[in-house]
Image (spheres, rainbow, N blue to C red):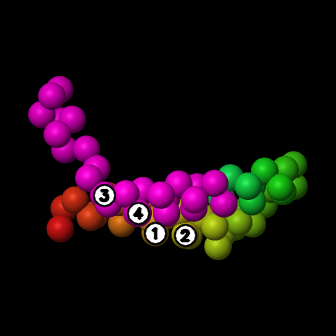
């Protein structure tokens, strides 16, 4: 609905770019490990991406 679209993320551009880089880093890490992927193998990259995404979701609520 149009009202729902107005509630989309409104994070600063820098935060969006940071999340984009974090996602690429995590993807590169996983891709480099295929097919021997194990749990928590790219945890540093995952935690950076998760923190960025959580900030992007919380930022508009502040």
Residue holding disc 4? 14
Q: Dots 2 and 4: beta carbons under 8 Å?
A: no
Q: Nearer the viewer, mark 3 or mark 2?
A: 3
First in sequence, mark 2 or 4: give its number.
Answer: 4
Quadrant hosting residue 14: bottom left
Residue holding disc 1? 51
First in sequence, mark 4 or 1: give its number.
Answer: 4
Q: CA distance from mark 2 to mark 4?
A: 15 Å
- Quadrant position of the N terminus in the picture: top left
Q: CA distance from mark 4 to mark 1?
A: 14 Å
Residue holding disc 3? 11
Q: Callout 1: helix, strand or loop?
A: helix
Q: Nearer the viewer, mark 2 or mark 4?
A: 4
Quadrant hosting residue 29: bottom right
Name the foreground residue: 11 vs 7.
11
- Seen at 22% across and 59% down, the residue is 60
Q: Position of residue 39 (x, y in %)?
A: 72, 63
Crowd around label 2: few <14 · some 14–19 · many ≥20 (10 Å): some
Q: Dots 3 and 2: beta carbons under 8 Å?
A: no
């Amino acid at each position: 609905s149009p009202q729902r679209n107005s509630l989309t993320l409104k994070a600063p551009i820098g935060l969006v770019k940071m999340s984009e880089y974090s996602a690429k880093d995590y993807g590169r890490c996983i891709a480099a490990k295929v097919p021997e992927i194990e749990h928590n193998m790219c945890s540093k990259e995952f935690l950076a991406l998760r923190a960025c995404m959580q900030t992007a979701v919380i930022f508009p609520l502040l």
